Structure formats: C-alpha cells, structure tokens
Image (cartoon, helix red, strand yellow):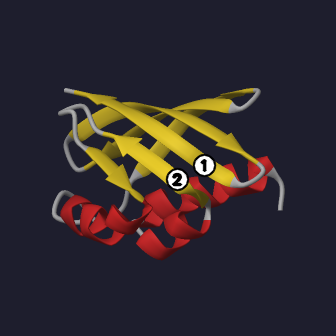
Amino acid sequence: MSAEDKLSGYATGFGSLDANVIGDNVTAEYKLFDKDGAVYQKGDLPQYISELKKLGDKMEISDVMVDGDKAWCKWQIGEIVGAGLISFGEEGVSQEQLFYL
C-alpha cells in the first residue's frame, strides 16, 4: 500500500468516524496533537472518536493539499471547523497537528 493510500484511508476513517479504519492507516508511533496541548496516540483513537461522535455523525474533509510527505486539510464536525497538518509515509500517518477555534 502506498503512502497516498494510507493518507486516503486515514481521511476515510475520520470522515466516517471509524477508529478502526484510522488505526489501520497510522504508524505504531502515531501522535495526534490537539490544540489544548493534549497528545493522543494510536491506542487512544477509540475514546477520541467516541468524543468526536458527540459533536456529529461524520467529519466533512475538504481543501486537501499534499506536498511531499505533508498534507493539509480543512475539516468540520458539527459547528467546529478546523485544519490539520498531517505527516505521512509508506508506513502510514505518523502525526497530525490540529488547529481550530
């Protein structure tokens, strides 16, 4: 599976709020950096996604821009709109930094 396939699978998982699909497309060392300073790891995804589901039943992802091993995207869940800076490679997504109000 290519790096782009892993990125696409990661986006699909977040779009459908499916922690298993997200987990299948991240590295063992994956880290999700939330704006409040919290750091979530691969094992935290089921709880993290259950919290997101309180905001909406899906995440709309748009305005994706890929440059080498980095990707930016805009996302919205419920009333919350934000952006993510994603690092990825052949092994999957290694990290994402979230930005939102």
Q: Position of residue 12 (x, y in %)?
A: 56, 61
In the image, is residue 5 above or below residue 39?
Answer: below
For residue 100, which quarter of the picture?
top left
Image point (30%, 64%), residue name: 49
Image point (28%, 38%), residue name: 34
Horizontal side, residue 1 vs residue 69: left or right: right
Q: Position of residue 1 (x, y in %)?
A: 83, 62
For residue 58, which quarter of the picture?
bottom left
Q: Using the numbered discs, state the Cα–Cα distance from disc 2 to disc 1 in whole angstroms.
A: 9 Å
Horizontal side, residue 81 vs residue 59: left or right: left
Q: Position of residue 46 (x, y in %)?
A: 33, 71
Secondary structure beneath label 2: strand
Residue that numbered label 1 is attached to: 93
Camera-nearest label, 2 or 1:
2
- Determine crowd level at label 2: few under 14, some 14-19, many 20+ residues with C-alpha closer than 10 A: few
Secondary structure beneath label 1: strand
Which residue reaches farthest right? 2
Q: Amino acid at mark 1?
A: Val
Q: Amino acid at mark 2?
A: Glu
Image point (59%, 69%), residue name: 24
In the image, is residue 34 above or below residue 55?
Answer: above
Q: Position of residue 50 (x, y in %)?
A: 24, 69
For residue 56, which quarter of the picture?
bottom left
Horizontal side, residue 1 vs residue 13: left or right: right
Mark number for residue 29?
A: 2
Which residue reaches farthest front? 29
Q: Work out whether mark 2 precedes mark 1 in sequence or the reverse, and give the earlier one.
A: 2
- Determine crowd level at label 1: few under 14, some 14-19, many 20+ residues with C-alpha closer than 10 A: many
